[in-house]
Amino acid sequence: MVTTATLGAACSLHVPPVTDQISHRPWPLPQTRWIMFMRWHDLLFLHWAVRPELLRPLIPREIELDTFDGWCWIGIVPFHMSGVRPRYVPMPFSFPELNIRTYVKTPGRSGVWFFSLDAASWIAVRVARWLGLPYYDARMTVQLEGDAVHYQSMRVHKKAAAAEFRASYRPTGGVYHAAPGTLDHWLTERYCLYAAVTPGQVVYGEIHHPPWPLQPAEVELRVNTMAQPIGIELPDTKPISHFARLQEVVAWPIVPLDRVASTH
């Protein structure tokens, strides 16, 4: 049985040429240099359709909800990271992370709105919150057994509402790249993020990675209270599920949204 610590220890310091493949991007790469590299492993994308009126009160007025055929989508994405390091720092680290999200847009930029991001790294949580991202301390374990992933997360952040996730999942089909215009593509091919820890202080960041190597997924979802702290009751329906074994990502600085809005 393999753990994330084992994977992290084996991570190479070499940074692959992630930005060599850019034709799939919906807009050009930022003109500045990226500042962070990371590898995302064993991702599960879980998505539920929800009515826009349920989410509108939760998103700042200057941010428009993004919809597909009239529906908003809530996503929960557990995974684990390795090789996480600033561009010029040769000391990568590794930890599990789980986020809850929806999809939004500003002029020229459709991206991810992060309601919360739970992580099993005290340092990562502190740095991310200082940057304006809603990270929370969590006690998390990831176990790999064959092609299956056993994932557990319990939020332990001081004074934060409880949130827990426990699931096992595995891929059930071949790798494919979602075609533009499909729901699979709309849910996953996102290259910027929005978030706010403090009301009225929205931050923005850009990322880049190759197209997602998606697979259909089989999921045993045992506990999921991740949406409760934001006041959302997820539909009692089977979520749309996707798996991705590995993604290599670079990220640019997190900045206040009002600093970049005029350039979109």
Image (cartoon, rainbow, N blue to C red):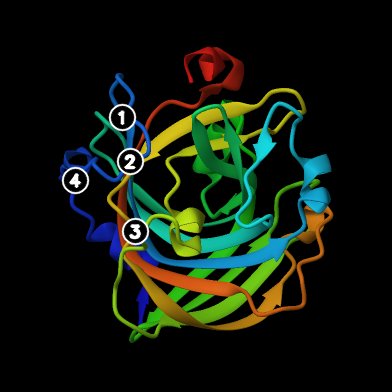
Looking at the rendered image, the disc whose residue lies closer to the viewer, 4 or 3, is 3
Q: Is residue 65 above or below residue 78?
A: above
Q: Disc 1 and disc 2: Cα gap in Å?
A: 8 Å
Residue 63 on image: x %, y %: 67, 32
Dot 1 or dot 4, earlier in sequence: 4
Dot 4 or dot 2, earlier in sequence: 4
Tags 1 and 2 in contact by the CB under 8 Å rule?
yes
Q: Residue at x 60, y 49 (%)?
A: 117
User: Which residue in the structure is indicated by mark 1?
Assistant: 29
Q: Is residue 25 left or right of residue 128?
A: left
Q: Amino acid at mark 1?
A: Leu
Q: Secondary structure at mark 3?
A: loop
Q: Is residue 148 left or right of residue 140?
A: left
* Relative depth, front residue between 84 and 113: 113
- Disc marking residue 183: none
Dot 3 or dot 1, earlier in sequence: 1
Dot 3 or dot 2, earlier in sequence: 2
Residue 70 on image: x %, y %: 68, 55
Q: Is residue 78 above or below residue 236?
A: above
Label 4: few (<14), some (14–19) or many (≥20) C-alpha neighbours in 10 Å: few
Residue 172 on image: x %, y %: 39, 85
User: Which residue in the structure is indicated by mark 3?
Assistant: 212
User: Which residue in the structure is indicated by mark 4?
Assistant: 13
Q: Residue at x 27, y 59 (%)?
A: 9
Tags 4 and 2 in contact by the CB under 8 Å rule?
no
User: Which residue in the structure is indicated by mark 2?
Assistant: 25
* Relative depth, front residue between 263 and 220: 263
